[in-house]
Structures are given as structure tokens and as C-alpha cells.
Amino acid sequence: MKEIEHLTEDSGKLIQISDLTASLRCPHASLEEAIRELQRDIQRQLAERQTNDAQLNVLELTWNTSSGIQNMTVVFSKPEKRTQWEEFFAEAKQKLANSLERSQIPEFFVSVPIRKTRAGLQFACASPTLGSQKDVWVCNSDGYVGQVCVLSLVPEPSVTSCNGVCNARILCVASVPASEERKACTNNIIIIIPHSRPTSSALVNVNISIIDASSGGGVAKACNSVVNSPCKSSERKGSFKSTEGAGGRQQGINSESNVQLDSGSSSEDSEAESQPERGAPSPSGSSLTPNHRQQDSSTSTVADGEPDNQQSTMWLGTEDGCIHVYNCTDNIRIKKNKIKIPHVSAVYSILYLDNRVFVSLANGDICVYSRDRGGWNVSSPLTVTVGTVSNPVVKLLNVHGKLWCAIQGSIKVLNTKSLQIDSQIQISNDSKPITNMTVLNDYVWISVQNSAHIKCCHHER
């Protein structure tokens, strides 16, 4: 600004000098030419300074939104105001960085060496298992074989097994929970026996209430049924409650008089009460004897273990286009894969979301697997084309119910209900692809190949 002021003053003085020169009576042509040359030089410097000064008043801002990269131009009245704004902005960034540094830094616990069944194996991917076992499946590959090491975290981190599972490189692994129907169908069955003592020939009118455990004690579905359960004495007061939860079936007896039910029959009433009353069917459509336990079919368990659809599984995607499915509780040393799903191209990423499994392939397609009561429908999955052969989907991420698909330097947001692309976000303008993504609250953190910068996107719900 001072330079512009000085040049303006000099230009005014040269005008005055030019007027005085014109009043000279002696020859002064050379003097006038020198004055005009000096005036032209000052005017040129003044124009350059004014142009540069205008550029100093402008600030270009760029930020990422859900619709892509947007630019904003901010024009300040003076360069000093722009400089002051930049200083305040840098100070705010520094204060934010200092506040983040105050958070507790995670403490390094221990390093666990992973055994290798052959030389050249390198770490590929890992995923924790679901359920009671606190394990982590660590996958190693060398391009020819795939190895899985089971890392147990209880009581301390240690490798429990390390075995080869396939003759291809493992590219991804994901844990898939058990069927949600098991939780949704778990009911509480309450059998309430009246307090009044029936006659020896009468039958007890039982009120059965079935309460959905998943609804947190919601509306009970009640039905009356006559059950052949003779009552011999007043000791049969109270209520019998049978509850099955996630940890197994629990039976408890709640009685107002702190006495237990006697389900046995006396000798004088056994013959009269051995047949149910006609025209009064039981809940299951057949007569119930005193020794018969009322049990909902959906809460029954298998003696030899749970069905396959009611167990958490691990899905391993390989470079040869296969998905190997294991139970989380399987000992991979002695058990083979439960399911093997072949594909036409390599499996890059696997993600479980809303009772479905999304699988991205090297040809740009995303296969969507769903399941029913019998298990996973692996024969006819839905296929959605999101990328191409040259630009496939390399990473999948669940961001508040939407599927973020990383394709080279951009992200396509897939609506999991309509299986249509909602929007596209450009992360990198060059050819560097996205390597990893993770979400925390409403922020998605993204890393780009061969870049020391981590990019953060804010997700608008």
C-alpha cells in the first residue's frame, strides 16, 4: 500500500515538473522527453502494484461435500484484512489440534508374533470373530496359498492355531453374525395357574401369555387353554414362568406364598383327570399331560449344537474368486470350509449390513447375498454394477446404513434399499486410489495410496 501511495505522489510531482518545463524559454526538448519517459515508467509500476494488490484481496477456498468438491472465492476490502483473517484461522486450527492432543493416547500393550507355515507369507487382512470367543482371524498370503492364524485374546493375546485354508491369496475377511430370526423369535412363555382350588374332576383353566423378548416387554399375546394339571392342595398356588434368553433356557418359579407347584396327581384324581375336557383344545392342538412341558418351537435348541444359520460365520474372499465360509467356532485345523462360493473374478471386499452380505468383485460388480430360515441363498445373489473392470470397487464401508464404495479416487454412495447410486464424492483428483476407509460418528476418514495425508469427510444424515 505504501508503494502505491509513493508512486501516486511521484506521478503528481512529474505533472507539475512538466508544466514548469513548458514555461522555459530556452530549448528543452530533451528535458520534456526525459520527463515523459519517467512518467510512463511510474504509470507502469503503479498499474502493476494495483493489480498485485487486487490479487492479495482474494482468497480461494476448496472443501469436500456430499455432492463433490466445491470452490469459494472470498474477496476482502484490503489485503490487511485478508492477512488478519488467515492469522485467526491458523490460530483456530492450532487450538483444535491442541485440544485433540489432550485425549488419552492408546498405550502399547504387546506384540504377538504370527507363525508362518511357509516362507514369503505376508499379512493380508484381519477381522475379529463374533460371539463368546474373543478371537481375531489373521490372514497371510504369498500369492500361492492363504493362511489363517487364530489369535485368542483371552486371557492374553496368543496364537492358538495357524493353518493353510486355500491355494490362493486371501484379499479380505469379514465376520457375519447369526440369523436375526433367532433373536426375534425368542419368546417368554408365562403359565399362570389360578389360586382357587379346583374340584377333583375339574380341569385347570390356564392363561398362557407369550411375550416377545426383543420388544423389551411389549404387548403380550394371551390365549386361554385348558391343561390337564390337577391341583391336589393349596400348595399349587403361584405362577410358573419359563424364559429362554440368549444364554439358554432358564426356568423359575414365582409364587406369592413362596411354595412350589406340585404337578403330580393324587391316586383318587388320576383316572378322572387323565383325559382333557372335550371341546377345549390345548395350545398345540393336542392334549398336554402333567409331565409335558410347554415349549415354543422357535426357542428349541439342538442337542448337538446350533443349526448353521444360527451361528456366526467368517467369510474369506480370495484372489481366485472364491468365498470360503467358516463358523466362528470352527477349528480350522481339523474342519474344512462350510460353504465355498465361486465367482467370475477376484473378491476385493466383503461387508455385512442389514442381514445381507455385500461382496465387491474385480469386474466392478457387487453381489448381494441374503438368507432365509434355511440359510444363505448362495445360488442366486443380486448383482449390481457399480464400477468397471478398469475401475472396480476395492473397499466397502457402512456409513449409517448407506454403502460407501471406493472406486479409484472417488466414492459412490449406494442406497442399500433401492440398490441405486445416491451420490458420488471425489476424494483424489489424480490417479492415486483409495486404500482404506473407516467411520467414526458422522466422519469418514480416508487414506490414499502413497500419501501421507488422511482426508476426512462429514456425512450428512
Image (tube, grey):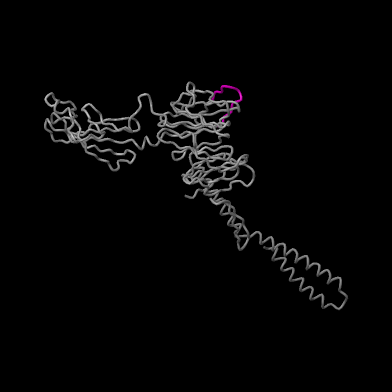
Q: Position of residue 341 (x, y in %)?
A: 51, 31
| Side of 218 relative to 403 (left or right) | left
Main SS of the magenta part reads: loop
The front one of 128 and 11 is 128
**Does the stretch in magenta take in 115?**
yes
Rendered position, 239 above or below 86: above
Q: Toward the viewer: 129 or 301?
A: 301
Residue at x 46% of width, y 35% of height: 377
Q: Picture coordinates of residue 362 (x, y %)?
A: 58, 37
Residue at (69, 66) in percent of width and height: 5
Task: Say which quadrant the N terminus sits in.
Answer: bottom right
**Where on the picture, by quarter, is residue 223?**
top left
Query: In the picture shown, does residue 369 fall above or below 97?
Result: above
Q: Is residue 167 magenta?
A: no
The magenta segment: 114-124
In the rendered view, tell whether residue 401 sits above or below residue 39. Answer: above
Q: Quadrant of residue 145?
A: top right
Q: Quadrant of residue 236?
A: top left
x%, y% of residue 129? 46, 31
Q: Which residue lies at the image location 44% right of the left edge and 36% below the top edge?
A: 371
